[in-house]
Amino acid sequence: TTSRALHVGTSFAREFRCDTPCRGERCVVWKWQTKSEVMVKQGCVSGVDIHFTAKIGCRTNHLGATLCVCEDGDMCNRVERTENTGRPLPVIRLQVVDCIGKVTGTGHIGARREHPCSSNYCHMTRTESFSDDFPPDVLTVYDCGDKGEFDFDLRLKNTIDFPGLYANGCYRIQYQPKESVTDCFCSKSHCNTKLPVVQAGPVRCYISHGASNESVVDTNHFCYGDYCFVQKHDGKFTKGCLSVNERNSWSHLKSGHRHILGVDQWLCQHHLCNLDLSRVARATASGRSIHRFNKGTSTFSVLVLLMLFICSYCFL
């Protein structure tokens, strides 16, 4: 089922409204404070794992930003829901955890002194800049969070502009030829002491960034991931690859379409399936995918072969 939602937002300089309400699986109202004004954004969410995230209710993070998710009728995401008046929503409490903060890097950036901090989620981000002639420059930031207004169990936005990622997972994202970003965030104390390694997946993908036409790709450069993606935001298309190394999110990310508060994403798992939206649709409709051959898969295959071998003797 889907719900109609108010689709209203504010920017730092002006207010904008969309006359046509959006339609999604759940409605969202998001409220936070800047130094000079109160910001509100409303809209829809579809395609995320609602059993793992996007739970019905309101949550306020450690910096005072509030996010409410509802499905109790069309247009349920009015600003008043963030104030828990009228029709109160369940209160979801976000745990406060202890994290470390430090910056390490290659080149001219050296290690900086480690310091403790507290947040609802610990964060780790690694940016790799590639060169044809030298090893990649690597900048790794361990800290207590993205921008404060983004830090929720339902991650509506992040500094790498790829919303809808799940807690306790790491994601390697590439949409430019010479740079990739690995983004991790976790929900237990001291969980960001070491950045997990994220291997590039086996699927070959097109890359492009900021194109106004969905068919624009860079035919000279490609990337590899567990998923290819197309993302549309404010009329601009970005294409690239997404690799994962989560303890729990393999079951949450799926091929297909997702909508996260004004951002549309399409994920697919077939070579060069992100040329345009028509090819994405064909790839997801066919159910074709190329999976990473990991230890779990290998062990399972060996067990199946062993059982077949044993059973063959049962009928002799």
Image: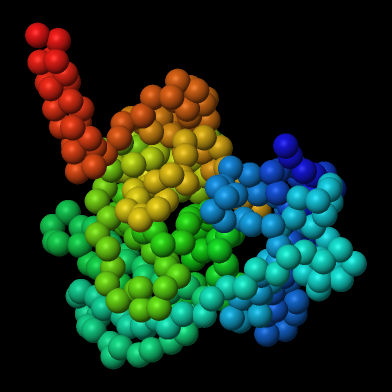
Residue at image location 76% in from the left, 50% down from the top:
71
Q: Nearer the viewer, residue 10 or 289?
A: 289
Q: Is residue 245 above or below residue 308?
A: below
Residue at figure coordinates x 22%, y 83% from the top left: 110
Left or right: 246 as drawn, with respect to 86:
left
Residue at horizontal 77 percent and vertical 64 percent from the top: 89
In terms of depth relative to the viewer, which is nearer, 229 or 220?
A: 229
> For this rendering, which residue is in front, 157 or 36?
157
Q: Position of residue 78 (x, y in %)?
A: 83, 61
Q: Residue furthest top?
A: 316
* Location of residue 225 (image quadrant): top left
**Res 228 visible:** yes
Q: Quadrant of residue 16?
A: bottom right
- Quadrant in which the N terminus is drawn: top right
Q: State left or right for residue 31 relative to residue 276.
A: right
**Label total for image:** 0
Q: Quadrant of the image for the C terminus?
A: top left
Q: Could you say where residue 151 lies in the image, as x and y percent from the top left?
A: 55, 70
Does the rendering let one see residue 218? Answer: no
Residue 17 is left or right of residue 309, and the answer is right
Q: Position of residue 135 (x, y in %)?
A: 15, 62
